[in-house]
Amino acid sequence: MRSRDLMSGAGKTARRSLLALAVGATVFGAGIANAAEKINIAALTFVSSSPLFIAKEKGYFDDEGLDAEITFFRSAQPVAVAIASGDADFGVTAFTGGFFNLAGKGALKVIGAQLHEDAAYDGSAILASNKAFDAGLTSVDKLGGHSFALSQVGSSFHYMMGNVAEKAGVDLASMELKPLQSVPNMIGALKSGQVDSMIIVPHIAKPLANAGAAHIIGWVKDYVPYQVGGLFTSARNVEERRDVVEKFVRAYQKGVADYRAGLLATDADGKLVKSDTTDEILEIVHKYVYADQPADKAYAKIRNGAMFITEEAKLDVQDVKAQVKWYQDRGYVSADANPDEFIDTSFIAPLGE
């Protein structure tokens, strides 16, 4: 009797061990199958990057099985370089001549939109320093002969001023362009009167003007239709990790929808209004933008900086093509850079469709 009991106990132990091994293998296998795909996103700490912040904080990347990390840069050009070099997987920032050159060489693919200048919403402001304003630079048509701060030659700031100057009847060649490498350097130079003018996003421009540190003398939206920036990735990601790109796009579009609902809602007269989700979106963005300031101050600045983003992040393809031609005509972009080859509308339908 005792022998049978021992044998029975041994059999039960063996069965339990086998069951434990089977369960462990199943859990381990599920863990491998469900492991999140790591991605790195290159961006600026601007309100314009809000859809990324929203997608991360609300779990939209997680829902798509993406472990997303955001790396921040101080100007647009290094973002494009990070994607081309493989240091980052996705980027969201303004277009530049350098970007178009990299894209023209096959390194980058534009897959969606970032900001878009729209007449109904405040966008990039044209600023004059106090010193220059007091000396007579009180309107855009008086920019001739004045200095202008930009991050780099061939940057989005360069393009905007070139187009604004043309529409305002100002000879860009008469202006002194001062590349200062980063936005903080541009702001410092304007505030100290070392440069006469610059163009900057509203969440920076309005506080400068409200604090009496500069004067807003115009708005880019009044001079040019403009697809300020885009959503892009590497050509390699499109070719080899298409499923990851699709997942990223879905999460980003959800972030865009929340951004539009929370920060771009308008009433029947087209005036911005507070929606049911505004406070939630402000709280999220504040973690990344003006994070060192109290909420009561930061929220107002964030709302002031909420520029227009098209529904579903649809790209104004024709305007991007016009930008490429402008840079090419001035020798900043290679003549063989072909936007038809680096704009990929297979992930997000273009504006107008």
Image (tube, helix red, strand yellow):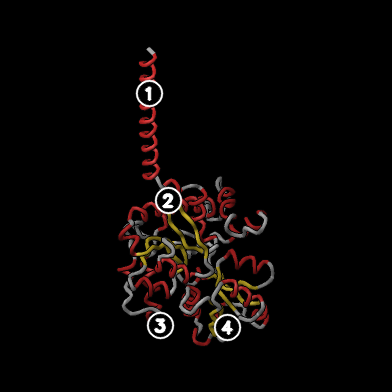
- Quadrant in the rendering for residue 133: bottom right
Q: Can you give x and y, in whole percent of width and height, for residue 89 in the image?
A: 41, 61
Q: Which numbered disc flags the more N-terminal residue, 3 or 1? A: 1
Three-letter residue code for mark 3: Arg
In the picture of the structure, the residue carrying the numbered disc 1 is: 10
In the picture of the structure, the residue carrying the numbered disc 2 is: 66
Q: Disc 2 vs disc 1: Cβ atoms closer than 8 Å?
A: no
Q: Can you give x and y, in whole percent of width and height, for residue 223 in the image?
A: 49, 72
Q: Nearer the viewer, mark 4 or mark 2?
A: 2
Above or below, 97 relative to 12: below
Residue plotted at (30% across, 60% down): 239
Label 2 CA crowd tier, 10 Å (few <14, some 14–19, many 20+): many
Q: Can you give x and y, in whole percent of width and height, for residue 69 in the image?
A: 48, 56
Q: Which numbered disc flags the more N-terminal residue, 3 or 4? A: 4
Q: In this view, does 146 lie to the left or right of 253?
A: right
In the rendered image, is residue 155 in sight?
A: yes
Residue plotted at (45% across, 47% down): 62
Q: Which of marks 2 and 1 is in front?
A: 1
Q: Nearer the viewer, mark 2 or mark 3?
A: 2
Q: Disc 2 vs disc 3: Cβ atoms closer than 8 Å?
A: no
Three-letter residue code for mark 2: Leu
- How far separated are the C-alphas under marks 1 and 4? 89 Å
In the picture of the structure, the residue carrying the numbered disc 4 is: 147
- How far separated are the C-alphas under marks 3 and 1? 85 Å
